[in-house]
Amino acid sequence: MNWSTVPLQDLSDDFKKDIVDGPFGSNLKREDYQAKGNPVLKIQNIKEFRIEWKKIDCVSTSKFQQLKRHSYHQGDIVMTKLGDPLGVSAIVDRAGDGLIVADLVRIRAQKINSRFLCYCLNAPQTRTFINTQSKGATRPRVRITTVRELPIPVPPLAEQERIVGILDEAFEGIATATAHAERNLINAQELFQSVLQSTFEQRGEDWVETAIGKICDVKDGTHDSPKYVESGIPFVTQKNVTWDGLSFEKTRQISQKDHDSFYKRSNVSFGDVLISMIGANRGMACLVDDKRTFSIKNVGLFKACPELDSGFLLLYLKSPIAAKHVLSLSKGAAQGFIGLGALRVFPISLPPINQQKPIVKKLDAVAAETRRLEAIYQRKFDALAELKQSLLQRAFAGEL
C-alpha cells in the first residue's frame, strides 16, 4: 500500500496561516454580534460533514477585517476542538467569508484532496487520536498545536479521488436511508398525537367541561434555589419532567430541613401528575410512579383524586389541545411561565370516571405501538451510523 502518514501541517503551504483557531473571547464578544454582516460559525453549527446554517450571528465588516486571520471561505474545513465528540469536521459549502469562534479550527490544506481530508478527520482513527490528546474533564479540548500535528494517512492523489468517490456514493445512500427512517419516526409520533387530538375533541354527550382545579387539588413546588448538599433529598426541577416519565438524572440534593419546608407546600406523592411550569419543556407532564422521597422546583402537580384517573389526565396534558392551553395561559416574553393560578383554571373535558380507564387503555396501546416503531427506527439510525463509521475505518486502513 503506497501510503505515507504525515502531520496535518505538512499538507498546508503555510500552516501558521492555514491552520488557525478562532480569536480569544476578549477579541470577539457577545456585543459584537449583529443580525447582518459576515457570519460567525460556532460549535453548534458544525456537524459531521455538514454545516448547519441556522441561528447564525454576524459581525460588521470592520470587525471582520480586524479578525480576518480567523476567517473562513468556501472550501475550507472547519473542525471542533472543544466538547464531546472532539474533531467534528465539515467543509464550508457556501460562498462568502466569515469568522470562527475560539473553539473551532479552520483548515486549509492545499496538498491533499479536501473531501478526502474531511472524511479522514471524521474517521474513528483520527477521533481516537484526538481524544487521547485532549485536556479537561468536564469539557474536553485540544490545543491548536495538536490539530496541526494530527497524523494523516496520505495515498497518491488518484487513490484519494477513488476513495472519495466510493465514500460519496455510499454516504449519499446512507443519507437517503436515514432521511426515510427520520420521516417514518416523525410519522409514528404524529400518528400518536393525532389519536390524542381526536380522542379529546370527539367527546361524548356525557363529558363535562370544567377546570382541573375544581376536581383535584393543584399545587406547586418551590421557586427558590436552596443550598445544595452532597448527600440528601433529590431536588426535581422542570428539566426532570420528560415525555418518557419522571427522571432523576442529574438531580441535585437538598437537606432534610429544606425538604421538610418544601414538602409542606407541595406534598408530592405517588400517583400525582407533575407538569413543568417554565422553560423549553413548559407544559410537559409525567406521572409520579416512583415512591422515593423528593422535592420539586418550578413544577406544578395535580394531586391524585377519585374523580380523575391520573393516566387520563396525563394523556390529556400530552395532547395538542392541552399544549394550546399552556401557551394561552402562560406569561412572560423572555421565558414563558405558567403559574399556579393558571394551572387551577386549566380547562379539561372530562368523561365519567368509569369511561376514563377504557380510554386510557386504548391510548396506552397506541403509545406502546408508537414506542415499538420508534425503537425499530432508532435501531436503523444506529445501524446506519455504525455503517458510516465502519466505512471510514476501512477507508483509512486502506481496505476499500
Image: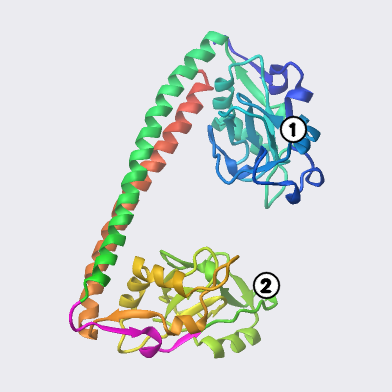
Question: In the drawing, what numbered circle is on residue 230?
Answer: 2
Looking at the picture, which amino acid does disc 2 mark? Glu
Along the viewing direction, whichever of 116 and 395 lies nearer the viewer: 116
Question: In the drawing, what numbered circle is on residue 70?
Answer: 1
Q: Position of residue 298 (x, y in %)?
A: 56, 75
Along the viewing direction, whichever of 133 and 172 lies nearer the viewer: 172
Q: In what quadrant of the picture does the N terminus appear?
A: top right
Mark 1 residue crowding within 10 angstroms, few (<14) / some (14–19) / many (20+): many
Q: Secondary structure at mark 2?
A: loop
Residue sitting at x 55%, y 32%: 124
Specify start and end residues of the magenta stretch as a single range.
204-219
The correct choice, above or below, for 177 with respect to 3 in the image is: below
Q: Look at discs 1 and 2 and give the one toward the viewer.
A: 1
Q: In what quadrant of the picture does the C terminus appear?
A: top left
Looking at the picture, which amino acid does disc 1 mark? His
| Comes first in the chain, label 1 or label 2 | 1
The correct choice, above or below, for 115 with respect to 376 in the image is: above
Left or right: residue 154 versus residue 211 is right
Left or right: residue 358 versus residue 66 is left
Task: Check if mark 1's residue and mark 2's residue have beta carbons within 8 Å.
Answer: no
Residue sitting at x 63%, y 32%: 78
Whether residue 230 appears in this view of the structure is: yes
Mark 2 residue crowding within 10 angstroms, few (<14) / some (14–19) / many (20+): few
Along the viewing direction, whichever of 57 and 157 lies nearer the viewer: 57
